[in-house]
Image (spheres, rainbow, N blue to C red):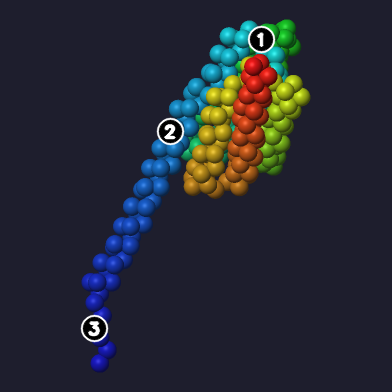
Amino acid sequence: MSAPVNEGSETNSEHISTSNMSSDDATLTFVVYLLGGSVVALCLIMKVPQIIAVVKSGTTKGLSLTSLMLEMWAFTILFCYQFANEYPLSAYVEYSMLLIQDMILLLILLNDQGHLNILTIAAFGIYFAGSTAISMGMLPSSIMYMLISSVTPLAASSKLIQLRQIIVNRDPGPISAVTWGIATYTASVRIFTTLVQTGDVAMLITIGTAASLNCAMLISILYYRKQKKTKMY
């Protein structure tokens, strides 16, 4: 005779398995939102140390205007693309905060270099019009894909230009190590949260590249600042 099947036991096992999965999912969701919250909180102040450093030093020497403009455009596309695709706000809200801080830095640089004029105002108008078009999904999907694909080279170029300037000058100037330390952390966290929340391959490549270059920037700043202090003694 075959042994009787304990249907109640099987049902209980399935229930326990389902409960464990639900518990794991809940834990993962909590971790994602906790990390995402830390990113958002840090992005509120990420560029503040850089702004303070520039104001205190009284010079923007060492900061690349081209690098900053490329970074702004990359952040703009990242924010608008994810907004248009209705991704969870927690996955990209920090870009709006970074854009505001970058805008302040840009105005400081433009003023310091004597570039604040009517052409600059016109350029800002075009920038805001383009940003609105992307955010509202007014562009064809082919152009949207082309834009998000351009973020990696834009962001990489931005960081490489600034990195090259540090290496050529052998001096980071007023560039803030704290800002780049925060940038390295937030980009690293976003690799994980993007993988869990959306799995968007284009976004993962973009953020992964950013994390690597942010780390390279941080190391360069710390290295050349230490070298400069060593020479002083």
Mark 3: which secondary structure?
A: loop
Near mark 1 (Cα within 10 A), the count class, few <14, some 14-19 or many ≥20, is some
Query: What amino acid is at disc 3?
Result: Pro
Residue 210 visible, this angle: no
In this view of the protein, which residue sits in the foreground, 112 or 3? 112
- Measured as percent of width and height from the top left, residue 12 is found at 25, 67
Query: What amino acid is at disc 2?
Result: Gly
Q: Which residue is mark 3?
A: 4
- Distance, label 2 to label 3, CA atoms, is 52 Å
- Measured as percent of width and height from the top left, residue 146 is found at 70, 39
Toward the bottom, the furthest residue is: 1
Q: Which residue is mark 2?
A: 37
Against 120, residue 74 (above or below) is below
Residue name at image x 48 percent, y 27 percent: 42
Quadrant hosting residue 84: top right
Q: Nearer the viewer, mark 1 or mark 2?
A: 1
Quarter the C terminus occupies: top right
Quadrant hosting residue 119: top right
Toward the right, the furthest residue is: 168
Residue name at image x 58 percent, y 24 percent: 177
In this view of the protein, which residue sits in the foreground, 54 or 18? 54
In this view of the protein, which residue sits in the foreground, 30 or 177? 177
Residue 39 relative to residue 84: left or right: left
Against 29, residue 126 (above or below) is above
Numbered badge on residue 68: none
Q: Which residue is mark 1?
A: 59
Against 32, residue 23 (above or below) is below
Quarter the N terminus occupies: bottom left
Quadrant hosting residue 188: top right
Residue name at image x 51 percent, y 44 percent: 192
Query: What amino acid is at disc 1?
Result: Thr
Toward the front, the furthest residue is: 233
